[in-house]
Amino acid sequence: MEEVLSSSLYTQQVKKLYKVGELLGLDNETLETLSQPERIIQVKIQIRGSDGKLKTFMGWRSQHNSALGPYKGGVRYHPNVTQDEVEALSMIMTWKNSLLLLPYGGGKGGIRVDPKKLTKEELEQLSRKFIQAIYKYLGSELDIPAPDVNTDSQTMAWYLDEYIKITGNVDFAVFTGKPVELGGIGVRLYSTGLGVATIAKEAANKFIGGIEEARVIIQGFGNVGYYAAKFLSDMGAKIVGISDSKGGVINEKGIDVGKAMEIKEKTGSVTNYPEGRKVTNEELLISDCNILVPAALENVINKFNAPKIKAKLIVEGANGPLTADADEIMKQRGIVVVPDILANAGGVVGSYVEWANNKMGQIISDEEAKKIIVDRMNNAFNTLYDYHQKKLEDQDLRTAAMALAVDRVVRAMKARGLL
Ligand SMILES: NC(=O)C1=CN([C@@H]2O[C@H](COP(=O)(O)OP(=O)(O)OC[C@H]3O[C@@H](n4cnc5c(N)ncnc54)[C@H](O)[C@@H]3O)[C@@H](O)[C@H]2O)C=CC1
Ligand SMILES: O=C(O)CCC(=O)C(=O)O
């Protein structure tokens, strides 16, 4: 296990990049450039706790690549955030935005903090201080943050208010995932989960005979996991396993997603769901199902548990849930993996709709926004599927998706004279 933990998300991503680079015939100079973020901002954030004591946290914003447009990507609050992780996540954003043909480069931010240990007032202070520290590097044409793990529309509202106070620039498009009263769109809240379900349905049709009655296990019951479960359930799939950081529950007869959320809200965990058997997250991942959706954190499927996975299709709700070794094992075992840069891209597509709406001063209906997201996800899936079939059938879907994405970034860099 130590090997997995020491093999960081960044190392995993660089491995995947070099594999694709070889297929595309990219030289070492290009690959080295693509491995490094263009800018990484590290800040010390200090807040006065409600107990009167000074509390210190480290935060980062990594701006990986801007060849295709302003940096775009979320900010996470988590006790395990590191510079390395944020750099890797910003690289993933570059490929994701490129694959979905969005006018964005890739960025990501994070603060090393356990938000469960802070009061709401402390979280607000922390969020405002983060913006005070990095505002010079943000802008609706420069870098556009959004929610990620443990951040939400309230976090974006604090960010926006602080940004406007400091700069005097009343530009609501600097952040996405905002409350609707502040230029947000209702759909952004669930757009990542909607995208995961949309892609799972397409992939299920192509690879495992359809989504109806497919038995699905979802790790993580936050923004991505909950909405993915809800939409998959609406599509006729049977959710047989769910989990959160405290553990999970398996019920072969099917889990009522709405009831599970009520229980999580009331008791703090889905493990208190009354019907079914309690499992650890490790057991959950290797339990029997047709589709597995890891929607929590990275590197959870690695060379130790990959040989035991029972699903025939894995749809990556989280960023980087499979290590490079796990990818190889899945390929050998004939298990299809739909990569994060496609599967969870509904979030950033939703953000794009919000940003464009703010930029144009328009009001889009939820129905229109939803249609744009679903259509773009379906188009991206079909483009990838055809490209995989025609050009890279002997490779996995991630390699094909990254090949499309990296190629677009390299062509943009060449056109701009950056390579
Ligand atoms: N929020 C968004 O729009 C997007 C999020 N993502 C990715 O999806 C993943 C989840 O993000 P969100 O749902 O936004 O976060 P969240 O903070 O809303 O939920 C995270 C969930 O994972 C659970 N969790 C945490 N540690 C765990 C562990 N060790 N084992 C099992 N479960 C654990 C939490 O209890 C919670 O249910 C992350 O990888 C994130 O980067 C990707 C695209 C967009
Ligand atoms: O909505 C966004 O800008 C980015 C969401 C995100 O962080 C992700 O796709 O991983």
Image: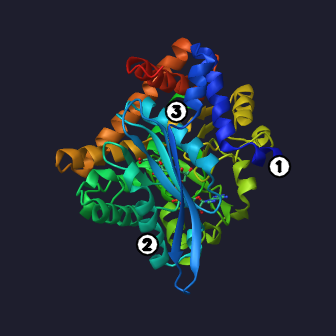
In this orientation, does residue 332 appear? Answer: yes
**Cα distance between the residues tagged 2 and 3:** 40 Å
Name the kind of residue labelled 2 in the image. Glu
**Secondary structure state at the residue bearing disc 3:** helix
Judged left or right of residue 353, residue 410 is: right
Q: Amino acid at mark 1?
A: Glu
Crowdedness near tag 1: few (<14), some (14–19) or many (≥20) residues, C-alpha within 10 Å: few
**Which comes sooner in the sequence, label 2 or label 3?**
2
Who is closer to the viewer here, 295 or 412? Answer: 412
Image quadrant where residue 8 sits:
top right
Q: Position of residue 214 (x, y in %)?
A: 57, 43
For the point 56% across and 21% down, the residue is 30
Pointer 1 with pointer 3, Cβ within 8 A: no
Is 148 or 241 nearer to us in this picture?
148
Three-letter residue code for mark 3: Ala
Q: Which mark, residue 354?
A: none
Residue identifier under label 1: 2
Q: Mark 2 falls on what kind of element?
A: helix
Mark 1 lies on a secondary structure that is helix
Which dot, 2 or 3, sits closer to the camera? 2
Of the pair 190 and 81, the residue shown nearer to us: 81
How far apart marks 2 and 1 lie (CA) works out to 36 Å
Name the residue beneath numbered marker 3: 203
Q: What residue is shown with label 2?
A: 124
